Image: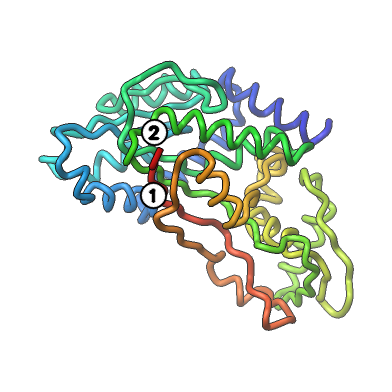
Amino acid sequence: MSSYANILSSMAAMKEGKTDPNYQKYLTEKLDRGEPNMVVDSVTELMSNDQLLQSESIRIVDFGCFTGSVINRVHLSLTESSKKKVNLFGFDYDATIVKKAALMWPQISFHQYDITETPAKIEPFQIGILSNVLHEVYSLKTNNKKEAEKLVTRSLKNIQNMIDIGGFLVILDGILPDNPEKEVDINFLQDNFYSKFIQFCKSEYCVKIPCKEVGDRTIQTTLGGLAAFLVKFRYLETTFWEQESSQIYNYFTKEKFEEVLTNCGFTVKKQDFFEVPKIQEKLKILDPTIQMPFKNTLIIAKRIN
């Protein structure tokens, strides 16, 4: 089965409630660990925005909410006075997951909605959340980069129509290095990590990763290939590798994110970048002028038109 067929198969399975239960459990536990969550923290910070403080009511929606863990944590972060004027919503395309979320968190309004489809006319939201969602949209078209970009843009256009002018969008997702095709020599400081990279390059990942041995535990690849490895290696020997191998996590560069968001009526107000923890202990780029690829990015965007 091709990687594109794998993606479509996985998406269809999720809509029918047939997702690998181990994968569902992993995603749910990951969101429910109780660890600090940068998306929740960002929403809490936005609540202190002067415009929102003066609002009589605030509507917050999590697009691609899955079982509702993130939007529930937003609820738990609110002060008692804030809860009186905040209405929380969760949208997901998986009907089974939406029903499950509604039973788990009755204080939140959950609805089935696919962000790639034109939305019904609804009362606008003041804050929207896209936590690790857009890369899944992009991955529906891994066989065609231009079509993948169009699908992400269309999804953001749909979301634009649901966010109030002056409202905010909080995006957490992967980030592609500025020059992903640049060749780099990587020296692996741990044998097992070197072996994992070889395994990754030989795997059925949906994008071919360059891999040329140029020295002792030293591989020549591209920055884009290294970025993909850094976010995927931990899934290689899990039961849900099939799902993870069919998704591209690092899809837009910083510049591309800004371009697409601007075209969809948003302006980037803040953007932070995050590395894989302790990665410098496991490998190094031999050229000291080249920066290690980031794992993901957090974007705060404001709708301006």
Q: Residues within 10 Å of mark 2 (few under 14, many from 20)?
A: many
- Please give the residue where the numbered disc 2 appears in the rendered image: 68
Which numbered disc covers residue 39? 1
Up-down relation of residue 166 to residue 20 (above or below): below
Relative to 29, residue 184 above or below: below
In what quadrant of the picture does the N terminus appear? top right
* Outermost residue toward the front in this view: 305
**Residue 209 picture location, percent across and down:** 81, 56
Q: Amino acid at mark 2?
A: Gly
Q: Which mark is residue 82?
A: none
Which residue: 76% across, 74% down?
Answer: 186
- Which of pointers 1 and 2 lies earlier in the amino acid sequence? 1
Q: Is residue 58 left or right of residue 19?
A: left
**Nearer to us in this view, 111 or 267:** 267
Residue 206: image quadrant is top right
| Residue at 77% across, 55% down | 200
Q: Position of residue 219 (x, y in %)?
A: 82, 71
Rendered view: 302 above or below 218 = above
- Verify CB contact (< 8 Å) between mark 1 and mark 2: no
User: Which marked residue is nearer to the observer: mark 1 or mark 2?
Assistant: 1
- Please state if 60 lies on the left or on the right of 141 as rendered: left
Q: Quadrant of residue 296?
A: bottom right
Q: Please, what secondary structure does the residue beneath circle 2 have?
A: loop
* Residue type beneath disc 1: Val
Q: CA distance from mark 1 to mark 2?
A: 13 Å
The residue sitting at 89% across, 67% down in the picture is: 212
Horizontal placement of 219 versus 46: left or right?
A: right
Q: Residue at x 40, y 43 (%)?
A: 169
Residue 252 percent location from the top left of the image: 62, 50
Q: In what element is the residue under mark 1?
A: helix
Image position of 271 with respect to 69: above or below: below
